Image: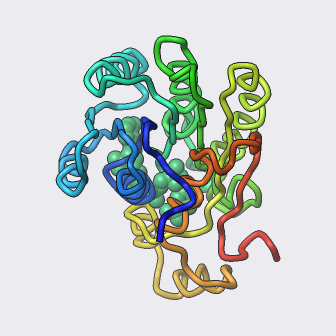
Amino acid sequence: MESFVSFEGKSIIVTGAASGIGRETAILLNKLGANALLIDINEEGLNDVCKMLRGGVTYRKVDITDTDALKESVMSAKEELGCNFTGLVHCAGIPSVTPLRAITDEKYERVMKVNVQAGLNLAKIFASRQCYDTKQQGSIVYISSVYGIVGSAANAAYATSKAAIIGLTKSLAIELASKNIRVNCVAPGFIKTSMADSVNSMFDKQYEDKIEKMHPLGWGSAIDIANAIAFLLSDASKWTTGAVFNIDGGFTAQ
Ligand code: NAD
């Protein structure tokens, strides 16, 4: 059966592509025919993903908080792929399970830089005339979280970053509409990825059971989020901008 979304003639930047949601998104977009630039700090992971993909893909190992290196990576990849970009998905992110008393300026700034500021800088790079394909509609997708919408203890820095993503999404949706660039975000519930594993490993089995019970449909998979990202990147959502798409197995419906 043919998919109702097609990425033929589209070229997408995916950050965080070495693992979890970003990796699954890169694999799906590649299956659907997209060209792609995969960005991550983890080169081994990038190499692994690339081995699974057909042509039209390149990768750059870069710390996305280094804005000059990020810009240079995007521009050189554009030359290598031979086309301007039509989409951007910012999946790179870090957790921070830290009670208020232990949040240092350093920890807070790192979470905000990776999760939010790099996303803002990526939009700035993407929305420049030298970078995006002005003949097509552009699409940017950010990853918020259920914790951008509801609170949880020992999570203030991470939750602040994910709520900021919602503000960033809505403001850029208005600002970039005149350039025919849409901006949306997804807000996932708990997904089994290396990020979730690193958080879960700090707690006992009871914690994992508790998390599962918070989702009426149980744990999610990275492909559940990748499918929604692909929809938001595709022309099938051409009239959707400024949206927060909750994909959380019912977590925030309660
Ligand atoms: P993950 O840890 O599997 O993948 C994150 C990727 O980001 C990794 O490959 C990592 O190397 C990369 N990365 C981190 N810092 C970087 C930096 N400075 N420069 C370049 N790359 C960097 O995590 P995931 O679960 O796939 O999370 C992806 C996104 O989804 C994150 O924004 C996360 O906050 C969000 N999210 C995840 C969940 C979940 O339950 N897993 C739930 C809600 C939201």
In the rendered image, the quadrant that contains the C terminus is bottom right
Q: Is residue 131 above or below residue 166?
A: above
Residue under the point 66% across and 47% down: 185
Q: Based on the displayed image, in which of its 4 quarters is residue 8 positioned?
A: top left
Instruction: Please state the horizontal and vertical placement of residue 28, each as a whole percent of the image.
Output: 41, 58
Where is residue 152 shown, x and y percent of the image?
70, 63
Q: Residue 30 location in percent, x, y? A: 35, 51
- Which residue is rendered at x = 79% and y = 28% of the image? 174
Q: Residue furthest front?
A: 1
| Residue drawn at 65 percent across, 65 percent down | 247
- Relative to 66, 121 lies left or right: right
**Color theme of the render:** rainbow
- The quarter holding residue 58 reads top left
Q: Is residue 207 visible from the viewing direction of this image?
A: yes
Answer with left or right where residue 124 lies relative to residue 185. Answer: left
Q: Is residue 25 above or below residue 134?
A: below
Comparing 24 with 65, the one in front is 24
